[in-house]
Amino acid sequence: MSPAPIEPTKPKLLVLIGPTAVGKTRMSLDIAKAWNAEIISGDSIQVYKGMDIGTAKIKLEEQEGIPHHLIDICDPVHPFSVAEFQERCASLIPEIQSRSKLPFIVGGTGLYVESVAYGYDFAEVGSDEAFREEMSRFALLHGAEALHEKLRAIDPEAAERLHPNDQRRVIRALEVEHLTGTTFTEQQKGQKKTSPFELCIIGLTMDRAVLYARINERVEAMIEEGLVEEVRGLLERGVPADAVSMHGLGYKEIALYLQGHLSLNEAVELLKRDTRRFAKRQLSWFRHMQDIHWIDAGENFNKNLQAIHGIIAGKFRMELEYTFNQPFDDGGNAQ
């Protein structure tokens, strides 16, 4: 009897997820240095040029020599999508592997991360431009909350994960149900959950009260760093207030202040509230994901880092010290 065929080795992909303000950036740098990795930003707003303070975008001098990808790659007027993110990663990941480096996605946009980690197929659903225009007109006449209620009525799980101001994704979720007769949530659950990668996903979590306090402190720091001036500059450059990019946290709230709809204090408090709610939705999304190794980021940083190193070593079946002297081959495997 002939021997069973040897299955091809899957390329390795490392992922770090977690809610906003949990400490992904700091942790990712130490992980990347230890595991010979290049970082791919898994954030839907950091792709936009000039949107730095509101996204807590890492500065070049803070990157400690670690290459970072999919940051500052398009103008804020461009409606960057999950399909485009997936397409970029499809070419970027093999490119990183060709340099004998480990691809490492870091971010909090759950759908973006999942789309790459599990190879989601978005093309099969299709689109209906007339329906999108109808929903856009509805939102214009009745408001974002009314549009969001339409989604809540047919797909409460998706409504829980999507903010009412994220009009593009709300309309897309409605469009999926319109085209297929099944909800966006059902479509997501129906996507294949086998990965084309040898996958290691680390999730950072934190006591909710501690996380919310960190969020409030981050918002105050952003205001001090010049978030108002950043948003004013975007609007003066001609970026529409209803652009996809301007739906990002910090931008829509400060835009309301600059347009005279809110006082600065009201905008700041709204931003804190919206960010806390966003963190809750992120955690809700991550709970539906599989294969996540959770780490409580509120504990000792060095202890957590060592625990993460152990998880990665066990998942990829490599010793940490091995990575310092042994590059990865084209499949992301240590030679």
Image (tube, grey):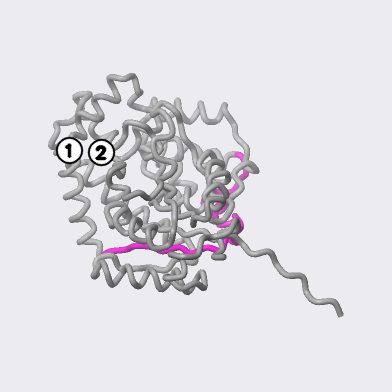
Point out the image quarter for the C terminus: bottom right
Q: Nearer the viewer, residue 335 or 139?
A: 335
Q: Is residue 201 visible?
A: yes
Query: Spatial distance from mark 1 to mark 2, Cα to Cα?
Result: 7 Å
Residue 250 picture quarter: top left
The segment highlighted magenta reads 179-206
User: Is residue 187 within the magenta segment?
Assistant: yes
Q: Position of residue 260 (x, y in %)?
A: 19, 24
In the rendered structure, which amino acid carries the disc numbered 1? Glu
Q: Position of residue 304 (x, y in %)?
A: 31, 69
Is residue 124 toward the left or the right of residue 183 in the image?
A: right
Q: Residue at x 31, y 53 (%)?
A: 25
Residue 54 picture quarter: top left
Q: Which mark is residue 251?
A: none
Is residue 245 toward the left or the right of residue 112 in the image?
A: left
Residue on which disc 2 sits: 53
Contact between marks 1 and 2 (CB within 8 A): the answer is yes
Q: Position of residue 264 (x, y in %)?
A: 14, 33
Q: Nearer the viewer, residue 99 or 230?
A: 99
Residue on which disc 1 sits: 225
